[in-house]
Amino acid sequence: MTSDSPANNNVASRALVEWVAESARLTQPANIVWCNGSSAERERLLGEAVKSGVLIRLNQRKRPGCYLHRSNPNDVARTEQVTFVCTPSAHEAGVTNNWMAPDEAYRKLQKMLEGSMRGRTMYVIPYVMGPVGSPYAKIGVEITDSIYVALSMGIMTRMGDSALSMLGDSDHFNRGLHCTLDLNPERRFICHFPQDNTIWSVGSGYGGNALLSKKCFALRIASWLGRNEGWLAEHMLIVGVRNPEGHTRYIAAAFPSACGKTNLAMLLPPPALRGWKVFTVGDDIAWLRVGPDGRLWAINPENGYFGVAPGTSARSNPNAMRMLGHDSIFTNVGMTPDGDVWWEGMDVEPPSDLLDWHGRKWQAGGGERAAHPNSRFTTPITNNPVLSPHVEDPCGVPISAIVFGGRRATTAPLVLEAKDWLHGVFIGATMGSETTAAAAGKVGVVRRDPMAMLPFAGYNMGDYWRHWLAMESRITEPPRIFMVNWFRKADNGAFLWPGYGENLRVLKWMLDRIDGQVAGRPTFLGTVPEPAEIDLSGLEIAPEQLSHALAVKTGEWKAEMASAGELFDRIGPSVPEELRRLHRELSSSLESGAT
Ligand code: SAT
Ligand code: MN
């Protein structure tokens, strides 16, 4: 084994050096590369990835700096069934997580890791989550044998020497050990050890399983750190909405994977809403803290976007299309004969001789998709034409509204405001959403997905809700809490609401509520807009269509509360009594026919 360690001289943290040496003793790589995050290093790694066939260089005239990766077809999404929270007791992980005892998990994965990098390169990737130097930022180091992971981490995080400088001689960093193994689904495990600030992931190269900064650290481990340290790590985008008077307010919105977070975070206002502008702070993860002024402040810990490609088009998200023009890695999309990318919903005719995501010739109308439904782009945050100027602010941005959204063909109204913080937590805790291609398994099945965190809360869901409730007493100006659903359908299967840029009309109603400009209509579930309160200028939508989108129906919510009650029962005594009480009250008022 050669230990390529010139950068070692810059590493002040003995704990880091020792952990890397220990990991190398276990996995036996042929050589070790400490990533410094320089552009020269990136060019070198890109060259190597192309040479070894991990990446395909796309047409550099059309998409400078862009590459295509085709994954193993068995490795295209998160695998929740083999994702474990390894706390000392099963109770700490709770019933919504898979649990394995830490000793057992370490032993099991250690066997798989022994000698697993023989003949391969080990990349050591120090990274910062959050603005470098921010008191709210955290440091992680990922060790991986995947050059695709190394290159993706270089986009998704602030990676390299800046992380080492920030770490200094501290031993306080997340230890992520990732090894591709042979991609055998039987030997695929993603194990989190919150007490050790450690993640071990084997057998997958897919984003959410292998880019350990993202779901593993910034959500599962961070949610656990957040509970201990008094803050929240959430599956939320952060968006700045500036009104024509020039006043910007920030909204944090939780949606399950592949429900349009990236699109909402960078939406282009419809022409009729003159003077409005939207800025992206984050598209997937928010770390929320109570600031010295008592307001809730959010940072985006990430430095790039790992977004869903299909459905992204010049019409649905022109800002995203612009940002994907350069320096991006595409995974599992189709490739045109001239070396460009193509996917379903791009609103561009597919050329003949298109290759599908497997690299096979694709037949239009043959029933197969050219791009995998969970095909992705990985692109630097700075590519975003509507990036917020506050994205590097060490303390983040103040949050005026929190939104919980799901993908529901029925039941959930376009928008609704909760009565207060407690009721808002209840709305978040009981939300449901249809499953998507972002996780392996059946698509389109409604499941409870509290706060869009079902797969990401790193500890007992009941305790997580308790932590949410406890946050209120520390916030002097709590954000208002809303629920949204862009995906409700008419009986003929068509979407009732046009979505995308038009969603700004819904955000505008929320801000109008905050400003006391609109009264809304109270229902048993919260306040919904009177149809006239939604700015429909320039939008043709039939009044009955809008009323259907806004409807809150007793029968549907009876079923919804029955299902939420089942989740509460499954979680058991750790569900906070306040949430149980709201559930009982709402269920009984629905029984007596509340409207
Ligand atoms: O693959 S990821 O988990 O990072 C994306 C998502 O599912 O939200
Ligand atoms: Mn996500």
Image (cartoon, rainbow, N blue to C red):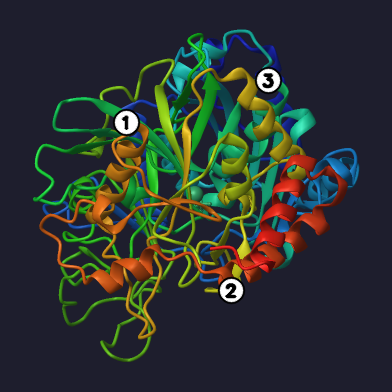
The circle on residue 167 is none
Determine whether the residue tagged by mark 1 lies in a helix, strand or loop: loop
Residue at figure coordinates x 16%, y 78% from the top left: 351
* Three-letter amino acid code at the position of disc 2: Gly
Q: Gap in Å between the C-alphas at discs 3 and 2?
A: 41 Å
The circle on residue 555 is 2
Q: Gap in Å between the C-alphas at discs 1 and 2?
A: 33 Å
Residue tagged 3: 229
Dividing the image into 4 quarters, which one contains the N terminus?
top right
Counting from the top left corner in percent of width and height, residue 265 is at 33, 43
Residue at figure coordinates x 57%, y 23% from the top left: 139
Using the image, determine if residue 590 lies above or below residue 482: below
Q: Nearer the viewer, residue 47 or 252?
A: 252
Residue tagged 1: 515
Q: Nearer the viewer, residue 86 or 353?
A: 86
Give the mark nearest the N terminus, 3 or 2.
Answer: 3
* Three-letter amino acid code at the position of disc 3: Glu
